[in-house]
Image: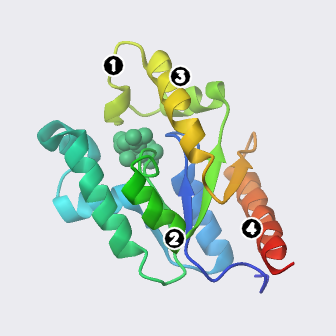
Amino acid sequence: MSPDITTRPIALVGLMGVGKTTVGRRLAKKLDREFFDSDDEIEQASGRTVAGYFRDHGEEAFREGERRVIERLLDGKPIILATGGGAFIPAKTRKILKATAVTIWLKGDFETIMERVSRKNTRPLLQVNNPRQKMRELMDVRYPIYKEAHIKVDIANGPHIRTVNRVVKALQAYEKKLVE
Ligand code: S3P
């Protein structure tokens, strides 16, 4: 892959359903990097599913666990990290992510996100009477915060690989700007 791509870890942030895990895994393959998913790591470390963790310990404890896991994973190795949709929101976790990784906000449009999240019912925050309204609320609260990521990439319609290609281009442009 291009030598211009950063050697820092790369962290994907953004709402549920934008494809952080799939895009991250393919990006890792393309850049020949190791891939991690913070939700998977929490599940492995705790022996619980994310939904089970929320149910048993609540969101606040989940955010603590999420921060610890992210801190552990971002130890300098140039990994690709897919974060859970809320990981970038608490100031402490966001600070760690921004200081140790190049952060990329994958931004999707509302209908694409809703279509994708409706395929799985494992997400605790959407176990509500009106998931569309909940998603709109999350967008309102989180978009101004996701904006703090180093790079924003609008997800492509169609196959995830198109988004992966957009991410690679955006990373190259970002690196180029840094050296100018
Ligand atoms: C969450 C998103 C989920 C998971 C948890 C909370 C959120 O990750 O971490 O359900 O707060 O948006 P995905 O974005 O991978 O679905």
Q: Which residue is mark 2?
A: 99
Q: Amino acid at mark 3?
A: Arg
Closer to the chain start, of discs 2 and 4, is: 2
Closer to the chain start, of discs 3 and 2, is: 2
Q: CA distance from mark 2 to mark 4?
A: 17 Å
- Residues 30 and 67: in front is 67
- Tell whether label 2 touches label 3 (CB within 8 Å): no
- Ligand 1 falls in which quarter? top left
Q: Which residue is mark 1?
A: 128
Q: Relative to 101, is 22 above or below?
A: above
Q: CA distance from mark 1 to mark 2?
A: 35 Å
Q: Which residue is mark 3?
A: 136
- Taking the image as shown, residue 116 lies to the left or right of residue 1, namely left
Which residue sits at x=67%, y=31%?
109
Comparing labels 3 and 1, the label whose residue is closer to the camera: 3
**Badge number at residue 171:** 4
Q: CA distance from mark 3 to mark 2?
A: 29 Å
- Tell whether label 1 touches label 3 (CB within 8 Å): no
